[in-house]
Image: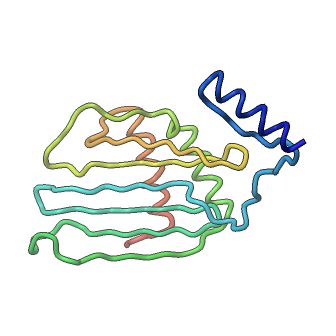
Amino acid sequence: MKRARTTLALAAFAVVGVAIFVDRTEATPPPDNVWLRAPLLHFDASGPTLGGFDHTSLTVFSDGLVSYVVRPPAPSPPFSNRYRAKAMLIPMGHVRQLMGELTEAGVFWIEDEPVGVVDIPMRTVTAFRAQGNQTIAHTYNYFAGFGEPYEAVEEVIEKFIDQHFPGF
């Protein structure tokens, strides 16, 4: 049987010029996710402002881990290391609520804003969603984000930050 498969594959290669070997004797199911942690949202605002370099980063994971990093602009030497960071676990209901509000605001279909600005940090939003055992990511960038839909998503993210990192 094995010799017949090999002969058939060689004959196909001779005729077509390509041989593709597919062994369908054993179907392998896709692997299960072992860990509950997968990214659901990453928000980043980085770049120069009139007050200095600004950097903000928020990452929310499916198991409730949230990481928030801020380097606010201030009169200090450029590229100083004045970062503040905090990570914590939040209830899964808050994660589901965040992703529901972001989905309703259009996070999975917004496109890049075509207008560039020099003194406003570029914002990058990446939202992840499960599709079977795969993860689909959608990323878009904007500077000022005037009007819908950019303001709606940023409003949801700012509300989430204010709720979980008050006064940070």
In this view, the residue in front, 26 or 65, is 26
Q: Considering the image in quadrants, where does the N terminus appear?
A: top right
- The relative height of residue 81 versus residue 28 in the rendered view (above or below) is below
Q: Quadrant of residue 38?
A: bottom right
Q: How is the image coloured?
A: rainbow
**Residue 6, image x, y percentages:** 77, 39
- Residue in the image at 9% along x and 74% along y: 77
- The relative height of residue 34 versus residue 156 in the rendered view (above or below) is below
**Residue 19, image x, y percentages:** 66, 33
**Residue 109, image x, y percentages:** 50, 33
In this view, the residue in front, 106 or 9, is 9
Q: Quadrant of residue 93?
A: bottom right
- Residue in the image at 41% along x and 47% along y: 154
User: Which residue is situated farthest in the top direction here?
Assistant: 15
Determine whether, in the image, residue 69 is placed left or right of residue 104: left
- Residue in the image at 52% along x and 68% along y: 66
Q: Considering the image in quadrants, where does the C terminus appear?
A: bottom left
